[in-house]
Image: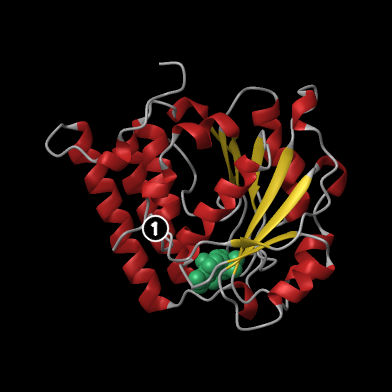
Amino acid sequence: MDLTSSAAAPSTEAAGEHTGSPAAGACPMVVIVMPAYNAARTLERTYADIPHEIVDHIILVDDVSRDETVEIARQLGLETIIHQQNLGYGGNQKTCYDAALKAGADVVVMLHPDYQYDATRIPALIEPILAGRADLVLGSRFLGDPLAGGMPKWKYVSNRFLTIVENLAFGLRLSEYHTGLRAYSRRLLEAIPYRLNNNDFVFDQELIAQVVAAGMQRRIDEIAVPTRYFEEASSVGFRRSVVYGLSTLRVVLRYVLHRLRVRRSPKLQARRPGA
Ligand SMILES: Nc1nc2c(ncn2[C@@H]2O[C@H](COP(=O)(O)OP(=O)(O)O)[C@@H](O)[C@H]2O)c(=O)[nH]1
Ligand SMILES: [Mg+2]
């Protein structure tokens, strides 16, 4: 499949509530992107928790939802981009980051519109980037108590297992790799060829592998973020989780083979900015 295909070229619907001035340079422009798929029942709640005083612009990319996601996004005044065909969670994020960089973002926060992650933690999430200490910050559920938030036990165990494997392969000590709340610096998104990644959920893991392969692993930080589990917040059941787990192990294997120079991967060719 051609992942860079323009078959689903998005159309921009509306300019949103842009109050920041990237050109001014003095104050970093913070952009929130929301990869959305059937988020009508949770979007308003998610939006209400966003700390708007520190956010310059919000972009929602709709992956051909079958509900009122687009109408609600428009009512909220979000910049709304609509895919022409459903691409999946990773394909959605590609459009999100392209649009955020185009809007002039210095810091990009990926927030799921399903009210699963606590958006009130965004100031703490972007702080390491604003302070120049990090280029990627992960909102970790495992620095807190994910079971208390309702994470199913089997998801907890598989997350722990995959995290141990990824830590060993990447030489890191992160508490988890599978969170959906993340903040990126502009320079990281410009350095990493995220467009080459998979269009499904494993996109998130490929991006971390790319960051490590680019020598930016010391620029990864994490903060504790509570999550909520309820029906609308989680569409990934057991079967898809198994596929996701196996895809994650494939990403790790690809990274190890790349590092050992057994098989070089074009996806992992990014170089550290300035290196
Ligand atoms: N399932 C699915 N989610 C998508 C798609 N495009 C964007 N998303 C978003 O991806 C996020 C994560 O999906 P979700 O079902 O909540 O995963 P889970 O919380 O890990 O079970 C949600 O915010 C969705 O709105 C898509 O094509 N399929
Ligand atoms: Mg979710």
User: Mark 1 CB in 8 Å range of ligand 1?
Assistant: no
Q: Is residue 140 visible?
A: no
Considering only vertical position in the picture, is 261 above or below 56?
A: above
Q: Answer with left or right where residue 24 lies relative to residue 156.
A: right
Q: Name the residue at 50% across, 34% down.
A: 190
Q: Nearer the viewer, residue 59 or 164?
A: 59
Say which quarter of the image contains residue 10. Answer: bottom right
Considering only vertical position in the picture, is 224 above or below 74?
A: above
Q: Answer with left or right where residue 55 lies relative to residue 176.
A: right
Considering only vertical position in the picture, is 8 above or below 71?
A: above
The kind of residue tagged 1 is Val
Q: Nearer the viewer, residue 168 or 25?
A: 25
Q: Nearer the viewer, residue 106 or 131?
A: 106
* Snapshot colouring: secondary structure
Quarter of the picture containing the N terminus is bottom left
Q: Name the residue at 60% across, 83% down.
A: 66
Q: Name the residue at 72% across, 56% down.
A: 118
Tell which quarter ligand 1 is in.
bottom right
Q: Answer with left or right where residue 242 lies relative to residue 72.
A: left
**Location of mark 1 (residue):** 202
Q: Is residue 61 visible?
A: yes
Say which quarter of the image contains residue 245. Answer: bottom left
Q: Position of residue 161 (x, y in %)?
A: 36, 55
Q: Name the residue at 28% across, 54% down.
A: 249
Quarter of the picture containing the C terminus is top left
Considering only vertical position in the picture, is 33 above or below 8?
A: above
Q: Position of residue 153 (x, y in %)?
A: 48, 70
Question: Please, which residue is most extreme toward the bottom here?
Answer: 66
Q: Position of residue 152 (x, y in %)?
A: 52, 72
Q: Position of residue 260 (x, y in %)?
A: 16, 32
Q: Secondary structure at mark 1?
A: loop
